[in-house]
Image (cartoon, grey):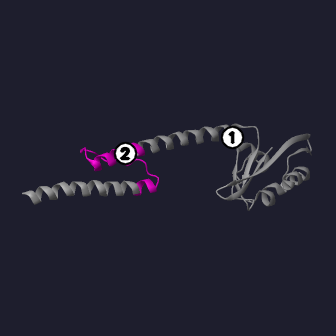
Amino acid sequence: GFWLIARWLFAADDTRIQALIDSADSLRDADFSFTIANRRDDEIGALVKAYNSMVSTLRTERQNLHQRELMLDTVIQASPLALVLTNENDHVIYANGTARQLFANGRRFAGRQFLQEVVGDQPAELRDALTVGQDAMVSVTTAKEQERYHLSCSEFTLHARTHRLFLL
């Protein structure tokens, strides 16, 4: 009888420990939906309770972050500024709707080289200013009118890589 009870008690602990290990694997994969049922009030139960609390906090933070990203994307897409973000190889990582309209008649150009492929069709004044990559006022004369742009260029490091941000 004693061995059977001891085996049952340790088997329950083994199951909860395995559940914690499996849940930790889910966390590593950024899956915050996994919680563990907790029916005991011992050390492993306290660990399960702490794990469930941590997962709940991470899930809430991820949802809040996602909502902020959606809001930021909405603001950037609605902005009258043309915004283009490139990586160190001049490939476009992001371009908002205003930039797509200005540089590509509304078509997407993510992944293409910005200065080589996208800007090549622009008027010389704008193309030259973008290539120099410094803040400037640019006047562009088209067949219809003369347009003036304020160009702002900046570099920053993200994930140990240099990126360039162009704002017009």
Rendering quarter of residue 7: bottom left
Q: Name the residue under label 2.
A: 50
Residue 40 relative to residue 35: left or right = left
Viewer-side residue, 32 vs 128: 32
Mark 2 vs mark 1: give the one in front.
2
Q: Which residue is labeled 1 in the image?
A: 76
Q: Residue at x 37, y 45 (%)?
A: 50
In the image, the segment drawn in magenta is: 25-54
Amino acid type of the residue tagged 1 in the rendering: Ile
Residue 129 colored in magenta in the image: no
In this orientation, which residue lies closer to the viewer: 78 or 59? 59
Q: Which residue is located at x 69 percent, y 37 percent?
A: 78
Q: Is residue 61 left or right of residue 102?
A: left
Total tally of numbered discs in the picture:
2
Q: What element carries label 2?
A: helix
Residue type pointed to by label 2: Ala
Q: Earlier in the sequence, mark 2 or mark 1?
A: 2
Q: Quadrant of residue 93?
A: bottom right
Residue 166 left/right relative to 23: right
Q: Where is residue 71 in the image (x, y as percent from the top left)?
A: 61, 37
Q: Position of residue 125 (x, y in %)?
A: 91, 50
- Viewport quadrant of the C terminus: top right
Q: Residue at x 73, y 60 (%)?
A: 88
